[in-house]
Amino acid sequence: MWFFANRIIKRYHRGHHGPHDHHHGGGHDVETKKSGTREIKVVRRVLDANDIMAGRMRAVFAEKGVFVLNMMSSPGSGKTTTLQKTLARIMPGLRCAVIVGDICTTVDADRLALSGAPVVQINTDEFGGDCHLAAHVVEKAVADLDLDNIDLLIVENIGNLVCPAEFDIGEDKRVVVLSVTEGEDKPAKYPLMFRECDATLLNKIDLLPYLDFDMDLARTSIANIHPGMPVFEISAKTEAGFDDWIAWLEAQVKEKLKG
Amino acid sequence: MHEMGIAMQIVEIATASIPADMQCARVQRVNLKVGKLSAIVADSLRFCFDLVVKETPLEGAELVIEELPVVVRCKACENQWTVTEPVFVCPVCKSGDIDILSGLELDITSIEIEDED
């Protein structure tokens, strides 16, 4: 059961330099590899362009005092409903805006607009990118928002447990929503989505009586992958468990904005 | 399936790395380091790469992927180990406070160009 055999996550830097940071650009060292071939050293991260843009976005968000939350999950986990109920609780105390990534419909954006928060719908049919949002796409969406009047910007990413985790979009925190209907094996199958996120929302707990979902196993698995990460058991339908989740979110936002 | 976007980035970076005096030479190989934790499926990436190199200086180039293991170090007791299952808890002291030393790479290390001199 070697899980890395398929695919998972990413490196991304939140302004700190990790052990894999390389210098950018510069001259190329040329060395003769073997007869008839020259090897040109490159040493660059493939996602450099994205990471540099994400860094620029992060600086803009910091300057404007905007906290950015990147919400990720599989399709159908209940991200949009969770977001709707979350907005209803934290507005108008926090001034919120939403960027919605969706492949071809505006259904989610229409639902979220009912909250009264400004909503920008992203069209993802470019850059081969219908599986994730990248920094340059978010940058375009942000151009339509008045950042001076926003405390919390929530980016609802494309429904996918793999690719979105690969792309830094300049966010402060990342949250993954996992619905109990998806099964307790998902963290182990996509461990780095859970490694890279700052909190997990286990959604649809109102359905637990009808499922064979092993909550202990799910929590153990998440704790193995990301020890200490907060896990909130919620139901977006009944709002069970929302108090703790909202308290965590508000604390994160206030922590940044008081700076 | 974001491998297409990744392949396009590889072509962009590799093309920009061809020295001015070798613009017409054939690029034979693009060498990549990919950590086992990166969300990359090597076969998908090769498939996409072969599509996007068409009509670029990289047409016909081979994509060589060196896979790197997931190596982590415990911040509490300095224990270093290779992660082979989805457990990032230190086996020695049970701390979860770790640094990932390798496994997240997605880097172009070099390109190899036919030297006509």
Image (cartoon, helix red, strand yellow):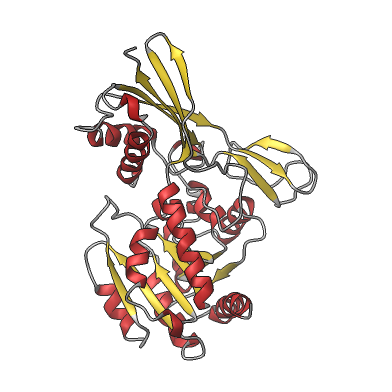
Q: Give left or right: position of A250 versus A77.
A: right
Farthest-out residue, front: B21
Q: Residue furthest left?
A: B55
Q: How many marks?
A: 0
Q: Which quarter of the rendering shows the C terminus of chain A?
A: bottom right
- Place of residue B102 in the rendered image (x, y in percent of width and height, measured from the top left): 59, 38
Q: Measured along the vertical axis of the image, is residue B22 above or below residue A102? A: above
Q: Residue at x 44, y 87 (%)?
A: A88
| Residue A6 seen from this side | yes
* Residue at horizontal 44 percent and vertical 47 percent from the top: A48
Seen from this angle, which residue lies furthest bottom? Answer: A92
Residue drawn at 32 percent across, 86 percent down? A114
Left or right position of B73 against A251: right
Kindly indicate the quadrant of the structure image that contains residue A230: bottom right
Please state which of residues B117 and A99 is positioned toward the viewer in this rendering.
B117
Say if A75 sits above or below B49 in the image.
below
Q: Position of residue A13 (x, y in %)?
A: 55, 54
Question: Does residue A180 appear anywhere in the picture?
Answer: no
Which residue is found at the position 50% from the left and 86% from the top? Answer: A94
In the rendered image, residue A51, in percent from the top left (x then y), is placed at: 46, 53
Instruction: Using residue B87 as the reference point, say whether residue A111 is left or right of it.
Output: left
> Along the line of sight, which residue is nearer the eye, B109 or B46?
B109
> Residue A248: horizontal and vertical position, in percent?
60, 76
